[in-house]
Image (cartoon, helix red, strand yellow):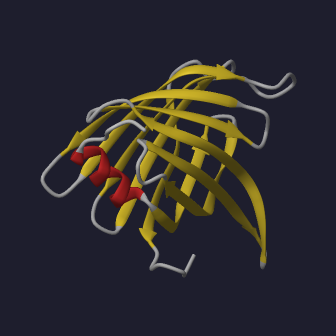
Amino acid sequence: MRLISNNIKTLQERLTGTWKGSGKGSFPTLESFDYEELLVFKCLKEEPYLEVSQKAWTLNGEERQLVHWETGIITMLSDRQLKWYCSHMNGRMEVYGGNILCKEDTIEIHLKSEFVKNEIGLKTALHSERIIHLSDKELSYTMKMSTTEVSKLTQHLKASLKKQETNNP
């Protein structure tokens, strides 16, 4: 068991739980879309890790359609640095390196992909970045990416989520 600092414990406590909300997606090669999201962080209390599960649905009439699902592990390397190991349902795997910026009432996490591996036949993502803003009960983020078709880092997703009460996912 590694000793973890109070700053890491605070970050774990603030993130741990279920977050629900909605977002907007766009990219030069896609039609713009709205989506609903469920994001769950689970903590190992004595270890500097978080388990992450993120699912997103679009609405097709009255029916929700799962369009994205990723799972992963966040490893907190220090008070200010982390790694996010992420696997997507479409066959993409990514490793993000990031910095944690603690402000008075908010926390910002800046992540940049360090490794991206795409399943053969998948439209190839080359690079991605995520910026996460965390306040008391609200989490918002933007995600940018570049691909073989769009080489410039371009905004893809923007969402706002609210922390759910315990036992109410």
Q: Is residue 133 left or right of residue 87?
A: left
- Determine the residue positioned at 66% across, 57% down: 55
User: As drawn, which residue projects farthest toward the front?
Assistant: 1
Q: Quadrant of residue 27?
A: top right
- Determine the residue positioned at 62% across, 61% down: 35
Image quadrant in which the C terminus is located? bottom right
- Determine the residue positioned at 42% across, 70% down: 163
**Which is nearer the eye, 65 or 7?**
7
Q: Is residue 24 left or right of residue 58?
A: left
Counting every numbered tag in the picture gives 0
User: As drawn, which residue projects farthest toward the right?
Assistant: 121
Instruction: In the rendered view, tell whether residue 126 sits above or below residue 56.
Output: above
Q: Is residue 94 left or right of residue 21?
A: right
User: As drawn, which residue projects farthest toward the left?
Assistant: 104
Q: Is residue 46 left or right of residue 89?
A: left
Q: Quadrant of residue 76?
A: top left
- Determine the residue positioned at 65% across, 46% down: 71
**Which is nearer the eye, 63 or 81?**
81
Instruction: In the rendered view, tell whether residue 54 sits above or below residue 4.
Output: below
| Rendering coords of residue 77 (x, y %) | 37, 30
| Rendering coords of residue 155 (x, y %) | 49, 38
Instruction: In the rendered view, tell whether residue 63 sits above or below residue 103.
Output: below
**Which is nearer the eye, 35 or 166?**
166
| Rendering coords of residue 21 (x, y %) | 51, 68
| Rendering coords of residue 167 (x, y %) | 54, 81
